[in-house]
Amino acid sequence: MSDLRELYQEVILDHNRRPRNYHAIDHPSRTARGHNPLCGDRLTLYLTLDNDRITDVGFEGSGCAISKASASLMTEAVKGKTVSEATSLFSRFHELVTTPPDLPAKTEGLGKLAVFAGVREYPARVKCASLAWHTLKNAVEAADDVAKTEDETR
């Protein structure tokens, strides 16, 4: 288990140091903002939609390693997906990070996103990991409010 934990940590650190899709998009179809007041994480998410498909996604902002890595991995995971597929992925990711740590993590079909299963052991970090995802949800729903994490329950 130690080797697996180290691999997970390395994936998170890599995406924090070299976040993928870390850029603004000129003329995005949707833009959403997220803020985690507990940790100070802030991000802006940009989506380009072609009909119902996410053809480009980018983000900018600042935050802790888990927040930035989650946004980076999320952008890789949703690029090319339909809005419905991205929404379904949001639900599966949210279930992964909010399932109590004493229960088995459901990681099937999550690919690299499974690295966040360990976050369940640290309730404050769940909010860091899920901020980008709540921001994505607001973007696909064209919601105007800032995505926040302080109302989340475990």
Image (spheres, rainbow, N blue to C red):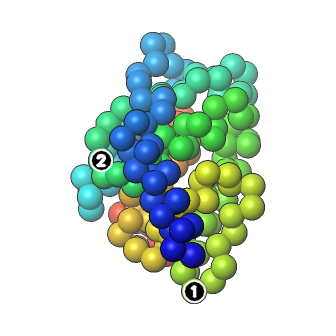
Question: Residue shown at 59%/37% (left/top)?
Answer: 76
Res 77 quadrant in image: top right
Please state if 69 lies on the left or on the right of 108 as rendered. Answer: left
Few, some or many C-alpha atoms within 10 Å of disc 1 (few <14, some 14-19, many ≥20)? few
Few, some or many C-alpha atoms within 10 Å of disc 2 (few <14, some 14-19, many ≥20)? some
Distance (Cα) linking label 2 and label 1 = 28 Å
Residue 58 visible at all: yes
Q: Which amino acid does label 1 sit on?
A: Asp
In the image, residue 106 lies at what x, y percent?
69, 69
How many discs appear?
Answer: 2
Quarter in which the N terminus is drawn? bottom right
Number of the label disc, if any, that sits on residue 63: 2
Closer to us: 92 or 65 = 65
Secondary element type, mark 1: loop
Question: Residue shown at 35%/51% (left/top)?
Answer: 65
Closer to us: 126 or 20 = 20
Secondary element type, mark 2: loop
Closer to us: 77 or 151 = 77
Q: Is residue 47 above or below residue 66?
A: above
Please state if 70 lies on the left or on the right of 91 as rendered. Answer: left
Number of the label disc, if any, that sits on residue 102: 1
Res 29 quadrant in image: top right
